[in-house]
Image (cartoon, rainbow, N blue to C red):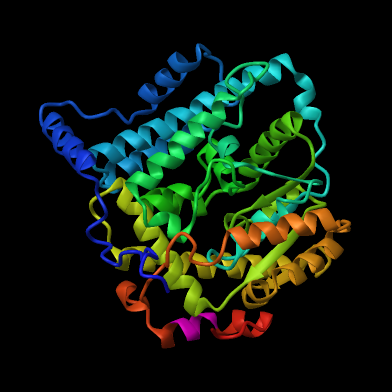
Amino acid sequence: MSRRTRVTSQDYRRPHRPLPVAALNALGRAAARVGGRVPLTEASLVAAARRSTGLHFFRDTSFREPLRRLVASLEGEAALHPFGRLIARQGLVRVLANRLRAEALRDRHPEIDATPVTAPVFIAGLQRTGTTLLHRLLALEPALRPLLSWEALNPAPLADPAPEPDPRVRIAEIAERSLRYLAPDFFAIHPVEAHSPEEDVLLLDLCFLGTTPEASQHVPSFAAWLEAQDARPAYRDLRRWIQLLLWQSEGRWLGKTPHHLEFLDALFDVFPDARIIHTHRDPQKVVPSFCSMLAHARGIFSDRVDPLEVAAHWSRKQARMVERAIAVREERGPEPFLDVHYLDLVSDPLKQVRRIYDFLGLELRESTLESMRAWLAAHPQHGLGQHRYDPADFGLERSALERTWAPYRERFGIAAE
C-alpha cells in the first residue's frame, strides 16, 4: 500500500470536524441558549418549501405523518449539532420542494403518470456486498437507465422545461465537494459523486419512508415505527418518481439499494415483472464494514456517535433484511432472481456481468465491454483510500456472528474471506 493511501479513522467517537464547522457549532449552541435554534417543525419545513418554489399544492399529503414522526425523532433522539441540524433541515425542505415541483409538473404533463416501467432491474443485497461496483458497471449499458446522483437530490426539474445546463448538476457538484470537506474518510468507504449512479432508496426518502435517516442519524423511534408500516405505499410513490425520471430520460430502469432486500414483497406488488440481482458476501466482513460506514456518516450530523449502538441496531436490522428476503424468495421461486457472490465479482467482474446480461436478456456489445474495462482500470480498489475497521470496535464477536448468519451462509454457499 502506498504511503499516500488514505486510511480511514477508527476513532468514531471523535468525528472529523473542520475548524470552521466547529466554530459554527459553537456559535449555534450559544444562539440556541437564547432561543435561536434552527427550526425543525413540520409547519416551518412546509412553509420553507413553499417559499423556495413559489408553489403551494401537495396533492398527496400522506407524507405528513412520516415527516412528523421523523422530525420528532430527530428532535428527541438524534443529538444533532447545530450544523448537522441545519443540514437536516435543508434536506427535509429539499424533499418537500421536490414534491411540490413534481405535482406541478404532473399537472402540466399528465402523460408522466402513464410512462411505462417495464421489467425494471434492481440490485438488492446487503450493504458492502459489491452492489455499488456492480451498479456502476451495469450503468454503462446504454439500454439501462440508472438514477444519477444529481437526479437523486432533485428528481423534479427546477424549471419546465429544464434549462441547459441543468442547474441540478451544479447543485450536486457543490454537495459532493461539501461532503468531501465534511467527511473525507467517507469517500474511501462509499464515494458519492455527482455524475455517478446513486441508490434509489433516496427516492423512497421523498415520502419519508426510506431507511436513510436511521443510517445517518440516531432515530430509533422513527426506525421502529417504519418497520411496522406497510411498505406498499412507499413503493407506489417510488414508481411515480421512476416514471418522472423515465419521462425525462428513457430506458430500462436500473435500481440499486440494500433497502429493497427488506421489502421485496412490496417491490413485487408494485413491479411484478421486476428482476432482482441478489449480491452476497461473508457476513463477518459485511456487518462490521457497514457499521463503520454508518459511524462515519453519523459523525457528519452529531458529536455523539456510539459504535455499540450502531452495531446493535444494524446487525439486527441486517439479519431482518435477509430473513424477509428469503421468505419472499421461497414464495416467488427462483425465476426473478440471480445470485452474485462478492468474491466472484471482484475476482472477475466481467464474467459476472456476462451472467447478468444473459439473465436480463441483454446483448453485451464490445463497445460496452470496453467502457467497463476502462471504468475498472480508472477505479482500482482503495483508489480513494483504504477502509479500515475492527469488529471489536462495535462489540461484534466472531462466534456470535457465525451463529446468527450460519443459515444464510449455508443457503447461498457463502465462502469465508
Where is residue 240, by image quadrant? Answer: top right
Q: Residue at x 24, y 49 (%)?
A: 17
In which image quadrant can residue 162 be found? top right
In reply to whether residue 180 is colored magenta, the answer given is no
Residue 59 % position (x, y) = 61, 21
Say if residue 146 shows up in the picture.
Answer: yes
Residue 249 located left or right of residue 211: right
Q: Quick one: quadrant of the C terminus?
A: bottom right
Q: Position of residue 120 (x, y in %)?
A: 77, 49
As drawn, 243 above or below 328: above
Q: Is residue 86 left or right of residue 170?
A: left
Name the residue located 31 percent from the left edge and 46 percent from the top edge.
301
Magenta-tinted stretch: 401-405
Chief secondary structure of the magenta span?
helix
**Vertical position of residue 182 compared to residue 355: above or below:** above
Quadrant showing the N terminus: bottom left
Q: Position of residue 311 (x, y in %)?
A: 38, 68
Relative to 7, does residue 64 appear above or below in the rendering?
A: above
Using the image as rendered, state which of residue 327 and residue 178 is in the foreground.
178
- In this rendering, is residue 177 above or below 112? below
Give the residue drawn at x 78%, y 53%. Answer: 274
Q: What residue lies at 75% left-to-right and 29% top-to-bottom?
A: 247
Image position of 35 (left or right of 347) = left
Which residue is situated farthest in the top direction here? 54
